[in-house]
Image: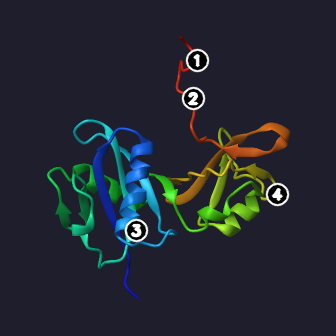
Amino acid sequence: MTTPMILGIDSGSRTVTEAEHLLHTVVEVLGLPSDVVGCTHFVSAGMPHVACSVTVPTSVDLALLPEGVSASLGESRTGSNPDGAALAAAAHASRASGRIVMFPGRDDLVGTVTVGELVERSAVAKVRVLAQSEPADDALAVATNDFVRPVWEDGVMTLLTMPASGGTLMPAEVPNPTPCCGDHG
C-alpha cells in the first residue's frame, strides 16, 4: 500500500469560495475520489490569499493541473510562485491549520444529526462548542445546514459549533454569510 502525499495548490484565490472551486476542479482533473481530505489555507506569501491542499496518491500527474496553478508535492514544485502551495501542503501535512472542505463522510452530514452520529459517519473526530472547554455531548443535535467545514485543531479534525435555537448546535461557519455592513445602503 502506498502512502498518500499532500499536494499544495495555489492560484492566488482571493476568497475561500474561489479556493474551494479550485480545490474541486483539481480533484476532478486529477481523477481523485470525492472522499479525499482537501483544505483551504489563508497564506501571506506575497499578497495575502487562500491556497489549498489535498491528499493524493504518490503517482499524481501535475501536468494535468489547470494553467496558472502553482503546486507543491514533496520536493516537486511547479509554477512561478509555489510558496503558497508549499505553505498549504506543510500546514495540511502537520495538521497545524486548515479549513477542511473535503473529507470522508462529508456527504452523509446533511440535515440534523447528533454529535455522536457526525463523528461516527465521518472523518470528523471531535465536535467543540465555541467558548467551551469540554467536547460537545454525543447526544446533542447539530443542524448542519448541509455545510460542514471542520478545521485542524491540535492535529485533530474538529468541527467548531455554536449554540442554535431549540437547544441544538450548528456549525460555526455558515454558508453564504452576510458581509459586514451588507445591509447598509
Pointers 3 and 4 in contact (CB under 8 A)?
A: no
When the figure is inspected, residue 79 is found, relative to residue 164, above or below; the finding is: below
Toward the viewer: 93 or 112? 112
Residue carrying label 3: 55
Q: Is residue 120 left or right of residue 38?
A: right
Under mark 3, the amino acid is: Thr
Mark in the foreground, 1 or 3? 1
Under mark 4, the amino acid is: Ala
The spot of residue 6 in percent (x, y) is 35, 66
- Around disc 1, counting alpha carbons within 10 Å, would you say few (fewer than 14), some (14 to 19), or many (20 or more)? few
Pointers 2 and 4 in contact (CB under 8 A)?
A: no
Mark in the foreground, 2 or 3? 2
Residue carrying label 4: 139
Q: Write the residue at 75% across / 62% down.
A: 116
Task: Kindly indicate the quadrant of the structure image that contains residue 76.
Answer: bottom left
Whichever of labels 3 and 4 marks the residue nearer the N terminus, that label is 3
Under mark 1, the amino acid is: Asp
Q: CA distance from mark 2 to mark 3?
A: 31 Å
When the figure is inspected, residue 101 is found, relative to residue 49, above or below; the finding is: below
Whichever of labels 2 and 4 marks the residue nearer the N terminus, that label is 4
Residue carrying label 1: 183
Q: CA distance from mark 1 to mark 2?
A: 8 Å
Q: Name the residue furthest top.
A: 185
Under mark 2, the amino acid is: Thr
Pointers 1 and 2 in contact (CB under 8 A)?
A: yes
